[in-house]
Image (cartoon, rainbow, N blue to C red):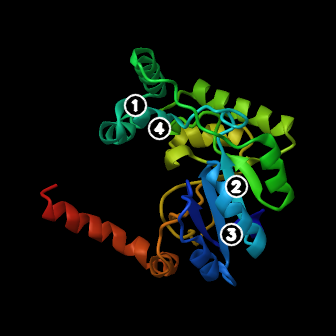
Amino acid sequence: MNDLIQRKKIVAYHKISARHNLAAHFDIYRGKDVLITVDDGDISFYHHLFPLIKAHQVPAILFVITGLVDTKIPFWWDELVYLLGAEEGEKKVWEVKTWPNHERLAYLQQLRDKSSKRPLEQTQLTTEQLQEMQAAGVIIANHSHTHPMFDQCTEDELREEFSRSRQFFEARQLKGYDLFAYPNGNYNPVAERVAKEEGINYAFLFDHKLPNKIFDPYRISRLSVTDQTSARKLHFILSGWHTKLLPFRRKIYNVLHGR
């Protein structure tokens, strides 16, 4: 596994739209030491990205939220936007990510109880699809059971997440339990310790950085890209310069906007 991860530029995608730039991305990945990772396990991965991965034989890891597989349960952030409306909901998602996990859960339940809308449903990946992708070479890996923010969880909540995701992987003969991507990239010393104790051997961040020269299997950096990223920008991101310049661009933006 070290050979798969070390010295590679690791890119991280999420949801894939029907109109995407992935063909141009794979033209760039050809012949490069790139590892594709995708968080959340949205069904769009199966329809749009998986066929390209098979055709081009690029290594890939799909991090799935185990509690959603074989269900129509929505991603909690999509449900929040659905219940509150787009503008308010998008802002609220970022706010509740900073709350203790039990407060986030209670707030979502309160919104459901008060809403007159029909419960939101989303088509999720199935066990059969995961097994098909694993057989084709995609590593099906662990992105928690319910996608809480791990820096906002108690130790008991963390252990419950790992316990339930481990049961899922074992029951379905999926091999990637020990590869873990922190939801939203959030972690703290307690989360890292618990991950190690619960059998995680590799933990991935969401920090938009190239790999460190000294390899730490519990703090693996990834470059953030989307299916809409242009070929020119992707070249720039893979070069490492985008990561170096981004903090300065943010500082300039904040100064210009009085922040």
Q: Which of marks 2 and 4 is nearer the N terminus?
A: 2
Q: Is mark 2 on a helix, strand or loop?
A: helix
- Label 3 to label 4, Cα distance in Å? 32 Å
Which is more foreground, mark 1 or mark 2? 2
Instruction: Establish if 235 lies above or below 205.
Output: below
Q: Is residue 93 left or right of residue 183?
A: left
Q: Which of 67 and 49 is in front in this view?
A: 49
Find disc 4 in the rendering and name its residue: 77
Find disc 3 in the rendering and name its residue: 6
Under mark 1, the amino acid is: Trp
- Label 4 to label 1, Cα distance in Å? 14 Å
Residue at position x 39%, y 74% in the image: 244
Find disc 1 in the rendering and name its residue: 99
Which is more foreground, mark 2 or mark 4? 2
Under mark 2, the amino acid is: Tyr
- Label 1 to label 2, Cα distance in Å? 32 Å
Which is more foreground, mark 3 or mark 4? 4
Under mark 3, the amino acid is: Gln
Circles 3 and 2: CB atoms closer than 8 Å: no
Q: Is residue 15 left or right of residue 111?
A: right
- Label 3 to label 1, Cα distance in Å? 34 Å
Find disc 2 in the rendering and name its residue: 46
Residue 64 placement (x, y as % from top left): 67, 45
- Report whether residue 221 is seen: no
Under mark 4, the amino acid is: Trp
- Label 2 to label 4, Cα distance in Å? 21 Å
Residue at position x 70%, y 66% in the image: 5
Q: Is disc 2 surrounded by few (<14), some (14 to 19) or many (20+) residues within 10 Å?
A: some
Residue at position x 47%, y 70% in the image: 229
Instruction: Establish if 14 lies above or below 236.
Output: above
What label sits on residue 113 in the rendered view? none
